[in-house]
Amino acid sequence: MGIWDLPASEKDAVELLQGYGIIPNERTCKNSHKMKLCFGKQIFWKCNVEECNQHLGERTGNWFKGCRISFVTAVRFIYCWCKELTSIKFCAEELGIADKTVIDCSNYMREICALEMDEKERKQIGDERLIVEIDESLFVKRKNNTGRVLPQQWVFGGICRETKETFLVTVPNRSAVTLKEKICENIKEGSIIYSDCWKGYRTSELENAGL
């Protein structure tokens, strides 16, 4: 699918997101009645039982809660993010997204990828003469896209160039000793490790960690 094949209407964008399980296909009201998704000036769920007549916003209880960009723009952002085309300048000029929204949406995408990788079955990656690229990152989350910053979390991960296998783990700190332990746990012996993160450590720290 190319960018010109992406949905041009909110209805089509929502249906595409439903197809990928990002937005639910069915909902029930507080009285356990089935609800119908209605499209108009606004998109909302409406209870099928006339006497009940409960309404629920389409963004309630899913990834888009607190996100104000249109679903069409959201789909295009997701597509561009996968193509690594999400610089603040690009998103402002091509998608009309504000700087802060670009940062928040990028963080959301990273969180989704991290959760997906965290749920995968753990196994060592790499092998003799295979290259594994490793890196570390600091995750910062805001509640509902606003308010105070919640506790920060360092994550450490890697990807094998040849097999595309990956691993991602949370770490209490980014010390050389901690990262060496995670390397031994997640990367097969004999793998060739490429990393930029060691540039931030003194030689003595790496030697003490046995690297």
Image (cartoon, helix red, strand yellow):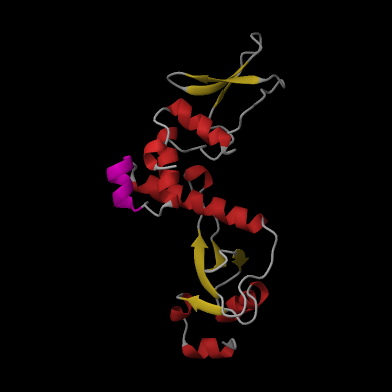
Q: Is residue 185 visible?
A: yes
User: In the displayed structure, would residue 31 be above or below residue 180?
Assistant: above
Q: Main secondary structure of the magenta part?
A: helix
User: In the displayed structure, would residue 32 be above or below residue 65?
Assistant: above
Q: Is residue 205 left or right of residue 94?
A: right
| Magenta highlight on residue 120 | no
Q: Nearer the viewer, residue 152 or 101?
A: 101
Q: Position of residue 121 (x, y in %)?
A: 70, 60
Q: Report the residue at 33% width, 41% height from top.
A: 95
Q: Quadrant of the N terminus?
A: top left
Q: Position of residue 195 (x, y in %)?
A: 48, 76
Quarter of the view holding residue 48: top right
Q: Position of residue 197 (x, y in %)?
A: 47, 75
User: In the displayed structure, would residue 182 be above or below residue 66?
Assistant: below
Q: Nearer the viewer, residue 210 or 122?
A: 122
Q: Report the residue at 54% width, 40% height from top.
A: 63
User: In the displayed structure, would residue 75 be above or below residue 102?
Assistant: above
Q: Is residue 149 visible?
A: no
Q: Report the residue at 61% width, 53% height from top.
A: 116
Q: Position of residue 169 (x, y in %)?
A: 62, 65
Q: Report the residue at 39% width, 45% height from top.
A: 101
Q: Quadrant of the C terminus?
A: bottom right
Q: Nearer the viewer, residue 60 or 95?
A: 95
Q: Which residues are magenta?
A: 87-96
